[in-house]
Amino acid sequence: MASSSTSTPLIYACIAHNTTILAEHTSSAASGTSSLASLILPKIDHTKPTKLTYTHGSNFIHYISSAPSEYPSSPSAGGLTFLCIAKESLGRRIPFGFLIECKNKFLAQYDVSSTDFSALPSYGAAAFNSTLKSLMHSHGTTEAGQDDAIRNVQREMDGVREIMTENIERVLERGERIDLLVDKTDRLGGSARDFRVRSRGLRRRMWWKNVKLMALLTMVVIFLVYLLVGMGCGLPGWGRCLRK
């Protein structure tokens, strides 16, 4: 896997055919992003062209997937996915503009009419890695590159609102153990503890409310009894009851 130490909010990018990664570049070899991409790729549906963003911690995973209907004469191109992982601060327009540029350049280099993408092995388009690196740097760190990315989005997409956003964990089937995702066990345990603390506090508050209500009712009953007895005994002096 090609990697670079250059700091850029575009952390990782790859081009894949179905689940086979054909080309990729990462700005941090220790980020584990390639493994994360390998988890996402099997979940991508190629029945229709899709632009989608997943959230994962402080990062966004964006991708553009193709469908055979886009390439009637070359169905294998319908299995292509252009994916990147970027910091949340970069937003969506720049990463999708970057992906559009990647797609255009990749298909210019690997023409769909003469390339059977399904026959390419893993990293079978590794010659494109250097182009990914260059595009990641320009679109992630330079103002001109980011302006180009935004223009790409404005030109080729109907609006950022078409880009759906989902939490990555919704896509993963129940029962799968994903070590790369944030382990939710501690958070769930903490939530349970917080719930118990809040429940105890609520019970205490309700108990005190009940005690105060009962005390108030007792005082009202005593006062009513006082009035009733007092009316018979001649309030306020209670003369009739005290007379011998």
Image (cartoon, grey):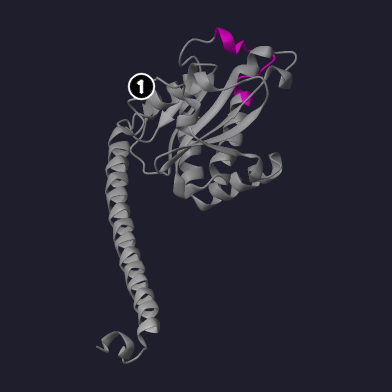
Please indicate whether residue 116 sits to the left or right of residue 12 in the image. Answer: right
Quarter placement of the N terminus = top left
Nearest the eye: 89 or 199: 199
Q: Residue at 63%, 45% (x, y): give it.
A: 160
In the rendered image of this protein, does residue 237 appear above or below residue 115?
below
Q: Which residues are magenta?
A: 107-119
Please indicate whether residue 166 sits to the left or right of residue 208 in the image. Answer: right
Residue extending farthest to the left is: 244
Residue 114 is one of the magenta-drawn residues: yes
Image coordinates for residue 6, horizontal then vertical, percent: 36, 41
Q: Residue at 32%, 54% (x, y): give it.
A: 202
Q: Which residue is mark 1?
A: 177
In the rendered image of this protein, does residue 56 appear above or below residue 224?
above
Disc 1 is placed on an element classified as loop
Image coordinates for residue 38, horizontal then vertical, percent: 43, 21
Q: Quadrant of residue 26?
A: top left
Nearest the eye: 125 or 40: 40
Q: Amino acid at mark 1?
A: Arg
Residue 136 is one of the magenta-drawn residues: no
Q: Quadrant of residue 24?
A: top left
In the rendered image of this protein, does residue 238 appear above or below residue 199?
below
Please say whether residue 63 is visible from this viewpoint: yes
Nearest the eye: 94 or 208: 208
For disc 1, the neighbor class at 10 Å (few under 14, some 14 to 19, many from 20) is: few
Q: Residue at 36%, 70% (x, y): give it.
A: 221
